[in-house]
Image: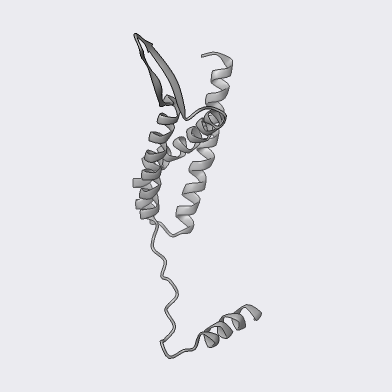
Amino acid sequence: MNDQVEANHAELKARAKKERARIKRLLKQAGTPPERMKMLEPVIENVSWMKAKLEDTTDRIRDGQIVIRYNNGGGQSGVRESPLFKGYEALFKTYMAGMAKIMEAMPVKESAPEPPADVKPSTVLDAILAEYKE
């Protein structure tokens, strides 16, 4: 590998490591059990890498074209989806599937109970505002 490729690889690895730490921190803060975190390790690893690659690809296609012209000779020409954009789209779908698995592993927090039907909205609002004033 040349120096530039090695530098790019090291920088990608550092961004993926930072994302991996962020995801693990969020899972831990959400109260995800350690055994579940251990099972998610490969998913977290891959999702972190994919996020870094998506960022790189976004930068490359930002000024590029989503569709490109082609000419195969013999009268075969037209417009097709950019291979770079097609790769980005596939990677993004896989990234989202991985993120969905991570999100599923987070414990569901209990939402606030619904106020009783006979409580007027202004009473609920007053109670909420009173909490913030304390």
Residue 89 in the image, given as x and y percentages of width and height: 41, 35
- Location of the C terminus by quadrant is bottom right
Left or right of 5 on screen, residue 46: left
Front-lying residue, 127 or 30:
127
The answer to whether residue 93 is left or right of residue 55 is left
Question: Residue 84: horizontal and vertical position, in percent?
Answer: 45, 26
Of all residues, the one furthest to the front in this rendering is 75
Quadrant assignment, res 114: bottom left
Q: Residue furthest top?
A: 74
- The single residue placed furthest to the bottom in the displayed view is 118
Residue beneath the point at 42% across and 38% down: 92
Between 29 and 66, the one lying in front of the other is 66
The colour scheme of the drawn protein is one colour
Number of disc labels:
0
| Residue 102: x %, y % from top left | 39, 49
Give the x, y percent position of residue 81: 41, 28
Between 65 and 3, the residue placed more toward the observer is: 65
The residue located at (48%, 48%) in the rendering is 23
Residue in the picture at 49% in, 58% down: 29
- Residue 18 falls in which quadrant of the image? top right
Residue 89 vs residue 127, the one in the foreground: 89
Which residue is at 41% across, 87% downward?
117
